[in-house]
Image (spheres, rainbow, N blue to C red):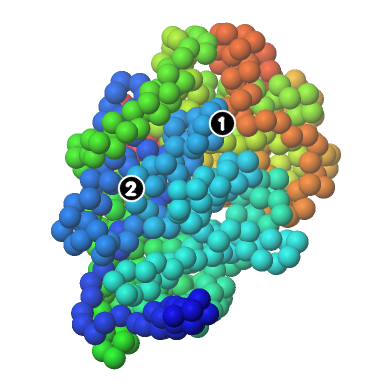
Amino acid sequence: MNIRTLASALAVCLAAASCSGPKDGTYSFTLLTTNDIHGTFFDSTYVGGNVKKSLYGIKHVVDSVRSADGAGNVILVDAGDIVQGDNAAYYFNYVDTLAPHVYPRMAKYMGYDAVALGNHDIEAGHPVYDRLVKDMKAQGIPLLAGNAIRTDNGKPYFQTYTVLKRNGLRIAVLGYDNANIAGWLSERLWYGMRFESLIPLVQKDVDRVVAKEKPHVVIVAVHSGTGNGDGTQLESQGLDLMKSLKGVDFLICSHDHRPRVVQSDTICLINSGSHSRYTGRGRIDLAVEGGKVVSKSLSASLIPVDARKIDTLMAKEFHDDFAAVKAFSVRKVGELREDLVTRDAYKGMCGYLDLIHALSLSMPEARISFAAPLTFNGTVKAGDIIYNDLFTIYPFENQLYVVKMTGKEVKDYLEASYDGWVNTVSAPADHVLRIVPRDDPRTGSRTWSFSGRSYNFDSAGGLVYTVDVTRPRGERVVIESFADGAPFSEGETYNVAMTSYRASGGGGLMAEAGIDTGRIEERLVATYPEFRDILYEYLKENSVLEPSSIGAGAGIGRWRFVPEAVAVPGIERDMELLFGNR
């Protein structure tokens, strides 16, 4: 046989192989899902050595399922928010930027088939997620976000989908980020892109992929909350998608940290919560006749992760990475003269927020500061401060912005903030704080919690004002003056320090004040580094942190809830419901 004849024969064989479908019979696959792990790479805290749920525990679950169902029948997918929320993520994002990032190496070790990006992954900035794309590609794992569209050519910035081949079957996995990123994050973090709504984009992409790839199973992973299915929540389009998608077998949701499974005859929605607490599990059984799928049956559930049951070989493999993060976390960065208790911020002024306001007001352009308690219930004890404590004081990678606002906008902003925080009290037994009893799907317990998100409970520094809990929104906040006694006027324009998250629209408070955050650049006076870096630089220069004296020197002003005879005892009762007698 000559070379030309051999080449022709080989081409025929390859064409036949590419056209061949699965053999007739029955097939079963297990889909395992994770989402919102938020840097829970390691199973031990860096201080105290407490055991926590982690990727090590998820790997134990994954291996157990692979052993039972067969490794080739298991698909592992993550739906985003990976590299934020823990010292480990911060360390490999910003401190050790030369070594290969730890997450792609862990994802390869665990055998992930595909990973979608989350909004907090985009929040890390171009240098981080562009590096992740490169490192993940080197590990053979696609990083997906099909709704991140390039502004220069209209094509996706990241990969949209991948096709897995198992036992003659083709499994398509499509991935998407949150559609509301522009409402939270400064464009400086995602320049060169825009983020499209998942509806109708996902269906269009599914139709295109099905026509081109002819998959037998279709999985869609979205970094979007489950939502309520009424089409009103851009950041939580899960149920909206489930109701409308055609040709999709599994929909992986995320973002809201609420574990949930929803099933119908044709599609299953899986949201495994957050922080490595659960692994989602989907099961699909298929029957093939004549090379085509003639029937499917679906089911879904959640597998709790046991922090004590881990892959010990994985822990050994990544021990040096953990040791590096721990060494970074426990190094001393200064001294604290008084305890900082974050939950005290819900009652009024406290040392914790005095510190945040004081550092914000230390920026030369700032006249007013807006800040909220970003750690729901944390304490940093007086004594030596280690870097780990800075994550309790300020857990997010938010930059500090100074923007122009009118006095009326400042007033309206504060009215909106406190309306999410306190009720209008009409009887002595009323709840002053906006708290409700509810079942916590993350822990399975019934408890009291705020009806809103406490990281949106902004107070102001630099002003003297009161908040009357007996008055309705619009009449609660009375601004008396600036901290130095200068008059405050709703008709004047002032420079206000706030996080980049807030200035970009996060929490909706700017919109409530009538400000279009899509044009925030027109109001921008100054930008500064991430707030944790500002705090760290202060400690390097001063070594001692004494919040009360810092606050007094910065002119943070004062504010309080009134009338005190009603507000104080009511808030104390509510705080006990929230936190007990601690």
Q: Position of residue 251 (x, y in %)?
A: 39, 68
Q: Is residue 67 above or below residue 269?
A: above
| 10 Å crowding of disc 2: few (<14), some (14-19), many (20+) | some
Q: Earlier in the sequence, mark 1 or mark 2?
A: 1
Question: Mark 2 is on which residue type?
Answer: Met
Q: Position of residue 575 (x, y in %)?
A: 37, 34
Task: Name the residue rendered at 29%, 23% in the picture.
Answer: 49
Q: In this rendering, is residue 160 above or below 429? A: below
Q: Secondary structure at mark 2?
A: helix
Question: On the rendered structure, is 188 left or right of 138?
Answer: right
* Amino acid type assigned to the residue bearing label 1 in the image: Leu
Q: Quadrant of residue 256?
A: bottom left
Query: Residue placed at 32% from the left, 69% from the top?
Result: 166
Residue 98 got which mark?
1
Question: Position of 278 compared to 112: left or right?
Answer: left
Residue 292: x and y, percent? Answer: 32, 87
- Residue in front for this viewpoint, 36 or 207: 207
Can residue 270 be seen? Answer: yes
Which structural element holds mark 1? Answer: loop
Q: Are marks 1 and 2 in contact (CB under 8 Å)?
A: no
Taking the image as drawn, is residue 236 in sight?
Answer: no
Q: Residue at x 70, y 45 (%)?
A: 188
Residue found 23% across the figure and 75% down from its top: 27
Q: Which residue is mark 2?
A: 110
Q: Quadrant of residue 78?
A: bottom left
Query: Where residue 322 appears, x then y in whole percent?
Result: 38, 28
In this rendering, is residue 295 above or below 315? below
State which quarter of the image contains the C terminus. top left
* In the foreground, 471 or 175: 175
Alpha-carbon distance for marks 1 and 2? Answer: 23 Å
State the quadrant of the N terminus.
bottom left
